Image (cartoon, helix red, strand yellow):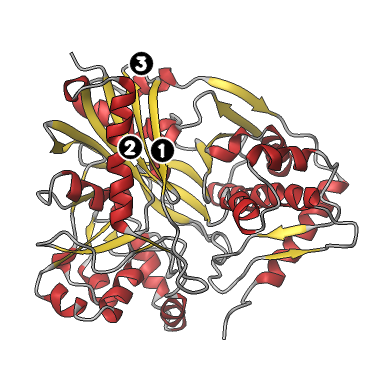
Amino acid sequence: MSKFILSLDQGTSSSRSVLIDHEGKMVAVSKKEFAQIYPKPGMVEHDAEAIWESQSGTMLDVMKEAGAKLGDISAIGISNQRETVVVWDRETGKPVYNAIVWQDRRTAGVCQQLIDANVDQVISSLTGLRADPYFSATKVRWILDNVEGARARAEAGKLCMGTIDSWLVWNLTEGKRHLTDATNACRTLLYNIHSGQWDDDLLEMFDIPKSMLPEIVDSSGIVAHWKGIPIAGVVGDQQASLFGQGCFEAGQIKNTYGTGCFMLMNTGDRIVSSKNNLLTTVAIQMNGKREFALEGSIFMGGAIFNWLRDGLGIVKDVYEFDALAKSVDDNGGVVFVPAFTGLGAPHWDPFARGSIMGMTRGTTKAHLCRAALEAVSFQSADLLECIEKDAATKVNEIRVDGGASVSKLLMKIQADHMQCEIVRPKNLETTSFGAAALAGLGVGVWSSKQDISAIWDLDLRFKPQPWNCELERQKADWNKAVERTKNWSKE
């Protein structure tokens, strides 16, 4: 009898494979980082073949570590960085260009033209998204327009496009299956959130041949096989986290602290159009039925800590970072706005750039670390404020996960800034578990969402201190600093 579910968690900076047993416990983990490519300011790329090599390598490594054989695996679940897109040759399987990453800003000018022409209103009404370079469509268009011969090959039906889930499934099945699930399809600007299908008007608007697109499938259920093992869960990473956190009821919220920060509120079977610059997205599709969510997307979360480590070299690791942030009582007047790749929700300014303000001769690296923690927290608090307005309700608790949520100081700051309880589970790898849970449901390892809820286990609750003058001052400084970063790189 099979023992495990193999969860593939393909992220922005690393690929991971996790073996999860039928009680929902992590048995073994393998992780490999891959290079981030920055051709020019505002551009971010990945080598798509390096993504596949790192992911396939961790699959084999994690099975070896656990002494697992193919027959021990019940199913495979896939979660992935969502808007990052690959265009590849249908016959050779080779990418025609690097994967263009969700953080990439090269199509900001194209998106601004759509906004100036008021086409963004049409896009928003059809997709629930915005005309922003964050999403996949303008990236694909850029490849077709800038890679020699790409458009002619695409129009001849010789090229495929897909988000990273599609790329992984294509490689796992040796080119036999070209598919994506609804949670990934809805992040492309080509998917009609009302019909649940690719939209011909959007394809014409972005000048992308329909023949390039993958088949849209459920997030749970057998869709393909790898060496005889069913691939039974395919889901975008943030929706995987929402599912893994057990946020199955309308009104429940999670926030993930990964490379970026992503807050999702389950809205059930209702498509809620945001009036406060959030996104409307598919939360899950099961048995052909879709559930939806409101989402706030922040581009720089945990990536700030990587920059302080790798870019500035002021800390060696996350533990030193956290210790430095704890060593000071406050930020010393420093405000850090990490708009390295523009601002996401609720500002949606691709021309904003990062800034550190309020420094004096007394500023130390400890103050910078403290300000970086607060930047993550303030960005997320801005999202919650928008969600509360859209939902017309006060949120009392948020479930959190992701690497940066291990910081108790950050979680305490977050509770104060949000004025609600922050609830952290024992298993912070909810993205991996969410993909595994969907795969397990797809093959009958678990029979219902209630089985998944029973696995969720509380670690800590962080309660806020009452709102006070100091928090009010910090919030005012943050708002002032954000406004000063906007439109920085706009010509």
Q: Percent position (x, y) of residue 210?
A: 16, 67
Q: Amino acid at mark 1?
A: Lys
- Circle 1: element type: strand
Q: Quadrant of the C terminus?
A: bottom right
CB-based contact (under 8 Å), mark 1 and mark 2: yes
> Mark 1 vs mark 2: which is more N-terminal?
1
- Give the Cα separation between the discs numbered 1 and 2: 6 Å
Judged from this view, the residue extending furthest toward the bottom is 491
Q: Quadrant of the N terminus?
A: top left
- Give the Cα separation between the discs numbered 2 and 3: 22 Å
Q: Which residue is mark 1?
A: 31
Q: Which residue is mark 2?
A: 58
Q: Amino acid at mark 2?
A: Thr
Q: Amino acid at mark 3?
A: Glu
In the image, which disc is placed on residue 466? none
In front: 442, or 341? 341
* Rendered residue at 29%/26% (across/down): 64
- Give the Cα separation between the discs numbered 3 and 1: 22 Å
Quadrant of the rendered image containing residue 157? bottom left
Quadrant of the rendered image containing residue 44? bottom left
- Circle 2: element type: helix
Q: Which residue is mark 3?
A: 23
Q: Percent position (x, y) of residue 192?
A: 28, 60
> Mark 3 vs mark 1: which is more N-terminal?
3
In front: 398, or 304? 304
Q: Percent position (x, y) of residue 326?
A: 78, 38
Q: Percent position (x, y) of residue 219?
A: 26, 40
